[in-house]
Amino acid sequence: MQTKENIYSLLSEIPDPEIPVISIVELGVIRDVKFADDKTIEITITPTYSGCPAMKQMEDDVRKKLLVNGFETVKIKTVYNPAWTTDWLSQEAKLKLQKYGIAPPEESTSDKSFLTGKTKNITCPRCKSTKTHLVSQFGSTACKALYKCDECLEAFDYFKCI
């Protein structure tokens, strides 16, 4: 018999389609797991933002993983409330992002600097310098901003606080 913990473990093997160094569980997209019966499971997910292009891929990956592991029916329920937040990223995920070359969110969602147009220096994930500057509010995906380090001169994505 599968348990909720087993399902979370299976789902933690699914990488984020846009940032493969972290799983969709570490990202905080998987919100709940419910068993309807031994062969039917319902997974509740919350997109990182309402227009996230990776959600279809995440849904397909979840469905495939669970079908391969014995479930005949997989229902995926998308919820938008509460809205996803970078506060749901695990500390381990933030460290993985940094090692991968993406600066993780440095603050909680109480940081509203992106909304007010103020920029701040973000720590470079490569050389750890705080002498950085914003190049673009949008990086490789809409949930990231593009920064450049003034020390090592490398460009890098910053996962915005949402």
Image (cartoon, rainbow, N blue to C red):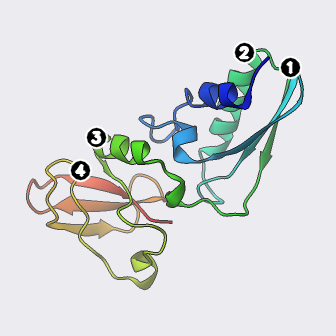
Amino acid beneath label 2: Val
Mark 2 highlights which residue?
A: 68
Report helix, strand or loop for mark 1: loop
Instruction: Between residue 129 and residue 134, name the one nearer to us.
Output: 129
Mark 1 highlights which residue?
A: 72
Query: Residues at badges 3 and 4 in contact (C-beta under 8 Å)?
Result: yes
Amino acid beneath label 4: Pro
Residue 22: % across, % down? 46, 37
Q: Residues within 10 Å of mark 3 (few under 14, many from 20)?
A: some
Name the residue at 22% across, 60% down: 123
Q: Earlier in the sequence, mark 1 or mark 4?
A: 1
Name the residue at 69% across, 28% down: 7
Instruction: Between residue 87 and residue 63, name the one nearer to us.
Output: 87
Q: CA distance from mark 3 to mark 4?
A: 7 Å
Instruction: Between residue 142 and residue 85, name the one nearer to us.
Output: 85
Query: Residues at badges 4 and 2 in contact (C-beta under 8 Å)?
Result: no
Q: CA distance from mark 1 to mark 3?
A: 38 Å
Query: In the rendered image, which quarter contains the N terminus?
Result: top right
Q: CA distance from mark 4 to mark 2?
A: 37 Å
Q: Earlier in the sequence, mark 4 or mark 2?
A: 2
Mark 3 highlights which residue?
A: 99
